[in-house]
Amino acid sequence: MQRYLKYLKGDPVIWIIALLFFAISLVSVYSFVPILVKTEGGSPFKYLFKHFVYIILGLIAMYWVHRQDPKYFAKLSKFIFYVAVLLLIFTFFFGVRVNDASRWVRVPIVGLTFQSSDFAKLALIIFVSRRLVSKEKFFDSWQKGFWPVVLPIIVICALIAKDNFSTAAIVFMISLLLLFVGRVPFGKIFTFIGSGMALLGLTVLLHLAAPSLNLLPRFDTWTSRFFKAYGEDVGSVENMQAINAQLAIHNGGYTGVGVGDGDLKHYTPEAYADFFYSSFVEEFGLVMAIILIFLYLILFYRILRIGLNAEKLFETYVAVGIGLMLLSQAVINMLVCTGLMPVTGQNMPFLAMGGSAMIMSCVSLGVVLAIANKNESDGPKNEVTTANEES
C-alpha cells in the first residue's frame, strides 16, 4: 500500500478512506439496483459498469486536481462562479425534467446528464472563500464588504431553489457557516438570515396568492413531504418509500441480512441513492453502519485539520466549506432514512450511484488534497496569512 501511496500527494488517510468508499460503493450499488432494473430495464451489470466508469472519471479528476497549486483556485474563482451561474440559468430554462424537476443538463453527443447544482456548490464555496479574504477589511461596510460576499450566495441559492429546495437550503447553511468562520459581524449575519426568511415567506405568499405565476413549481411536493414526515400522513401509503427505508434499517439488525439478500431494496425507490443508508444498514448491519459513520467523521476531521494548517486564509475557508458540504450530505441522507427528516434528494457522497455528484465530490476532495500537498511542501504553518497577503 505504501508503495502506491507515494504517487498520491496530500493526506494518505483521505486517500485510503476515499478508496474504501469506492470499493464499498461498487459492491453496494450492484446490490441495490434491482428496483432500477425493474423500472428502467437492463441488467445489474449495466449499471455497475456505468457506475464504475464514473468512479474512474472521478478518480482521474481527483488526481489531476490534487496536483495543482491552490493559488489557481483563487485566481479562477470568479470565472468558475460565472460558469456556475450560466449553467444554472441554462438548466432553469432548458434542463432535462425528471420527477417534475429540471435539475439536469444533458451533455451533447455522449447523452449523459449531470446536475448543474453539483458544480455550483463547489464554485460558490471557492468564490465566497476568495471574497471573504479580499473583503475582510471592509466587513463593517454594507456596500464595500458585506454585499459583495452575500450577493453571490443569494444568486446561487435562488437559482437552485426552484427545483431543488433541499440543496439550496444546504448551500445557504454552509454559506452562513463560512460567513461565521470568516468573522463577518454577527449583526450582519443575523440580518441576512432574517432577510432570507422574509424573502422566502414573501415568495410563498405570492405563490399561494397567484398560483398561475408558478413561482414555486414544486411547492406542493415540499409541503407533501413535510406532512408525510411529521403530520397525519406519516403512516399513509403515499409515504411508503420512507416507511420501507425505516423497515430496512429494522430488518438489518446488528449484522445485516447479507450482501445481496436485502428485501426492502426491491420496493424502495432510489435505494441506490437517496435511500442508500437504509439499504446499506439492511444488508451490512448496524455495526458496519456505525463504522461508515466513523469513516465520514474521520474524513471531516482530516479535512478540517488540513484547512486549519493551511498557510492562507483562502485555503482554510475552502477546506472548511468542502468538509461541511460533504458531511452535511451524508448526515441528511442518514436522517432521511431514519425518518428524522422529510424526504430530500441528498445522497451519500462517494457511495451512492450517480454521475455528476460522484465526480464533483471527487473534485472537491481533490481541492482539499491540493491544499494538503501544499502544506507538506511549505512545511508547518507558522501563522495565518492576513487579508493583505492573500489579496
Image (cartoon, helix red, strand yellow):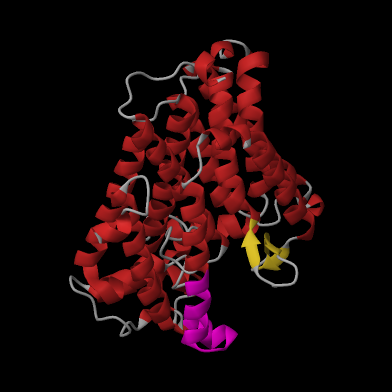
Q: Quadrant of the C terminus?
A: top right
In the displayed orientation, state which residue is furthest to the right.
212
Whether residue 49 appears in magenta in the rendering, the answer is: yes
**Residue at the location (70% across, 72% down)?**
111
Q: Quadrant of the N terminus?
A: bottom left
Give x and y (percent) for residue 231.
46, 57
Q: Is residue 305 above or below residue 271?
A: above
Whether residue 42 appears in magenta in the rendering, the answer is: yes
Q: Quadrant of residue 266?
A: bottom left
Give x and y (percent) for residue 356.
57, 60
Q: Give the tally of numbered discs.
A: 0
Q: Is residue 267 above or below residue 185?
A: below
Give x and y (percent) for residue 122.
55, 44
Question: In this orientation, which residue lies closer to the viewer: 119 or 186?
Answer: 119
**Residue at the location (54% across, 38% down)?**
125
Question: In this orientation, which residue lies closer to the viewer: 92 or 68?
Answer: 68
Visible in this render: residue 320? yes
**Residue at the location (44% across, 49% down)?**
365
Q: Is residue 346 left or right of residue 248?
A: right
Q: Is residue 162 above or below residue 108?
A: above
Which stretch is magenta? 35-53
Question: In this orientation, which residue lies closer to the viewer: 357 or 224?
Answer: 357
Q: Quadrant of residue 352?
A: bottom left
Which secondary structure is most common in the magenta stretch? helix
Visible in this render: residue 338? no
Give x and y (percent) for residue 147.
65, 22
